[in-house]
Every structure is written in structure tokens, then in C-alpha cells.
Image (cartoon, coloured by chain):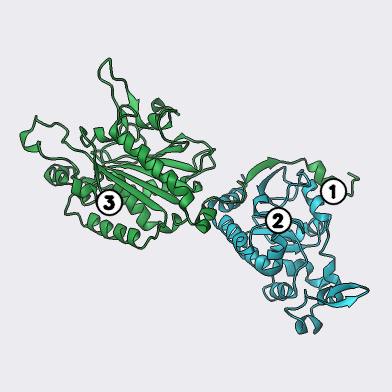
Chain colours: A cyan, B green
Amino acid sequence: MIPVPGLDSVVCSWVTIQAEGFDLHGFFVYSSSDHRIPEYINGDGLADLDQWSTNECAVFIVHSPSTQWIEYAKSTSHTWWKLFGDSISVESEIPHLFLGIENEPLIEIGGTRKSLKELFSPCLDRFIAGDEISRILRGFSLRETQHPCLILFKDLRDHLIWYIDMSDLVGLPIIELRKELQIWFDRGEFRRILEEARNGR
Amino acid sequence: MDWEDLDERPHGDWYELNDSDTVIVFVHGLHSSKKRAWFFEGRTKQSKDVFWPDLVRSANSGIGKASIFLVNYYTGIDAGLYDIGHCVTSIFNQIEMKYGDINKSIFDFNRIIFVCHSMGGIIIRSILCKNWDKFTEKQVGLLLIASPSRGSEMANKFAYIESIFGHRQAQQLQSSSEFLAMLHKDFKDLINDKKIPLLTGKETCENKFYIKGKIPWFNKAVVVSEESAGQYFGRVEMIPDTDHASIAKPDSVKHQTHIILQQFWQKFEAQKPDLPQAQYTRLQSRIGEAKKISRNIEDFEKEINGGNS
């Protein structure tokens, strides 16, 4: 699982990503209104999906990573860290001090409440990009309404891609949503696609 | 696919493949095949040839929409050292693999009904015991047709002949078989421990020997006794006017074995809405099937070049 600011960052980093030797790549595409997917990703989702999608598949997600994620990526030399580590400063003590409450809107400035992450980690904000979802969908010849979904491909410019509709997940309680995704990644379909990509079919 | 298209080679065939979430898997018995086990040969002008899977998929079968898979494994008289363990491996591979262009295996279905004749039931029970974790989120039905769960006295009677051929499968079917004793214990545990929570079953047996009257000392004998056929799922159903072969060859939808399958199907269907919600949710995946689609690469170039491709 690789949180990215948007389509362009994947295109720009594609050579580096390819060098990592993944058999399969993909985009997990959802909007902020596809409840409760963003909520789940903000919680345990990123770590769950990173584990379930295995080391052979890199799934990109337009999402602002938490400080825990950044720490995790750094400590494990995760592909994400190789791609974005240089531009993220976690040397500061601030993220460590506020670990766990960085997303809480604690401080009011000019009538709007801001979280500590928004205040102290402006570099992370560039990961939040609303229209990136539409760009990704259009880039894969999908309609802008075809989300949430998972798009899988071997190469960024492949003509044939896999499209997995996840619209029935919208509105599910997080515990059920997690179970559905876990079963999907664990079941034959994901493994079959991975195998097909590995064999270059 | 039609009956004529089937061959005797040891591989499975999708006889019917549709978008139903249920698959009926036919598993034949000893010295038989997917082509012969279920085939009723009409010998008079009044009676016509009937292949049971054809009846099952017909509009008036009384059985709802389901895909049909026919298992086939090596069990000829010349099978020799190819024992039941080898058959188990062969069949498990068949139900796990995807054939040719068909991107589906038995495990892609949420609901699986195994229709097993004779030794086929032993093999499937063995597969369920060894691979129960792959079935925990499936609704599984097991219709055992004259399956000798505790062995067959007839296998004992023919033991000498089978030993001449060195036929391991037949030897393992004897009532004293250690293999069957272990399997019986394991399968009992599987049911008692509810390792496959949604497993239901039904057992049937024949009521006469192949050639009743012609060999006097076999008049009261059957290949699979009521006791041996009825071990796990309550009262065993004795199918009238059937022998060990004809019990698996219904000649019409009015044949008692077909009616048993109809009733089993109805119960299987009725159980569906009664499933606990969490399990039901897991059976009916909410994530759509992966579709391989073609894209226009110009769309992509347009996006990354800001509309200036």
C-alpha cells in the first residue's frame, strides 16, 4: 500500500516503483463521501491493506499518511519511504509529541478548527487532493462515478486492466468492511490476478 | 456440453456453467466414470437414455439454477496401486483448478452440493476432513448415494478376486479397512466440532443386489447396507427397487433418487435465509467480480499531460 498525492506522483516515480519488482500494481479509488472507507483507511486500513496486498502487489491510494505510517514506512524501508521519505521531515520532535492526536481538530484559527497535523506538517497536506480521484478514473477510461473501486494492472500503460467494483461496501460498518476486504484479498480472485500478472498473461 | 462430449480420461468437466452462486458436483464411485455412473440406458422403445445431470439442468427438474461439475478419476479394474488417497488428491486438484478459459473453480462458488455415489462419498468426506478450512465460509451439501461409510461386506466377499488384481481401492473399501475407520472418526469429529458450520447432508442406500434371484446366496445381500450408508446425517433413506448401480441412474424426474435430490435442494435453499447474518454476509461477497477491461491509453496520456496529449 503506497499513499500518494495523486496520479502525477505515480507517473513521476514509475521508474523507481518498477525497480522494486512488483508483479502487480493498482489504485484503490474512493472519495471522501464513500463512507466508511476513508474512515477505515484513516484507522487500521492502511496497515491492513499493506499486509493483505502482499509484497508482490503495490496498491496506490490517494491519502494523507499518518505519522505512525511514516514511522512504520521508515523503520521497514517500505517502498513508500523510498519514494517520499526525502520530502517528509520527521526529524522534528513535534510528530512524536503529538502521536495519536495529530488528526484531532484541537486548535481554532480564523473560525475553523485545525488539527495538529494540518498545522505542523504542511508537507503532508499535499497528499489530500480531491479531484485526483476523477483524474485516475478518467486515466483508466472509467467513468468518474465508478468508485469506490480497485483498479489493478501490471504496467501503468497496459491496455488491459482489472476493475473491481466496491460500491456495495459504501455504508458498511467498519468491522464488516474490513472483513469483506480481508476475505477478498485472501480468496482466490486476488491470487488468480496476481498469478496471471506474474505469468504475464 | 453434452453427454457425447464427455470422455473417460481422469479430469473434471463443467457440464453446466452459469452465474448461479451454487454448484452441484457429481462424484462417481468405484469402477465407474463421469460418463457411465449417472447414465440410464433405455433398453426398450418405451424407455429412453437419460443422463442424470441432464435431468438436473432441465426446466422441470424441480431443482433451481446451478452450475454442474462432473468429477472423473482413475478407478478401473487395472487401477492397481492407485489407492483412495491418490483419488483424493486427483479430485481435490479438479475442484481447485480453473479449466482452460474458464476463470472459475468450485471454490469460487459460495454454495456447493456434492452428489456422491459409492466410493465418491468416501473421497469427498476425506477431502472435507483434510481441507475443512477451505470450506468454512461455504454452504456445503453432501448427498451420499449408497456410500459405504463403514465399508462394504460385498467388498469383503470379492476381496480374493481384488487381491489378485492388487486393487488397492477395493481393498480399502472392505469393512475392516483401517483407512475407513480413521476417516469415520475424523468425519465424526468434523461434524461434532462444526468445523464446516454450514455443512448438511443426506444418506441413501439401495434395497437389492445387482442380479437378485440369479445367485441365490446374494438374494438378501446389498453392496452397501443401510447401516454402512447411514452414519452421519440422521435417518438413511432406502431407495426402493434400486441396486447399487441403478440407484445413481434416475430414468426420470419421478425416480426416487432424483426426488431425494429435489428435497435436498429445497432444504438447502431454505437454509440460506436462516444463516446468521455475519456468515451470510461472508457467503455473499459484496465486492464485485474482477472484470478484465480494455482502456484507451489516450485517456491516460491526456490526464498526465493536462489535456495536451
- Mark 3 or 2, closer to the camera: 3
User: What is the quadrant of residue B239 in the picture?
Assistant: top left
Q: Dot 3 lies on which element? A: loop
> Which residue is under mark 2?
A28
Q: Nearer the viewer, residue A61 or A13?
A: A61
Q: N-terminal of the two: label 1 or label 3? A: 3
Relative placement, left or right, of B31 versus B108 is left
Judging by the rendered image, the residue that carries numbered circle 3 is B234
The chain that hosts pointer 1 is B
Mark 2: secondary structure: strand
In this rendering, would A26 be left or right of B62? right
- Spatial distance from mark 3 to mark 2, Cα to Cα? 49 Å
Amino acid found under the numbered disc labelled 1: Glu
Q: Which tag is nearer the camera, tag 1 or tag 2?
A: 2
Q: Position of residue B169 (x, y in %)?
A: 24, 47
Left or right of B276, for residue B46: left
In the image, what residue occupies the spot 56% across and 53% down?
A191
- Per the image, the residue denoted by label 1 is B303
Between B6 and B257, the residue placed more toward the observer is B257
Q: Are marks 1 and 2 on the same chain?
A: no
Which residue is drawn at the image coordinates 42% and 54% (left, top)?
A: B198
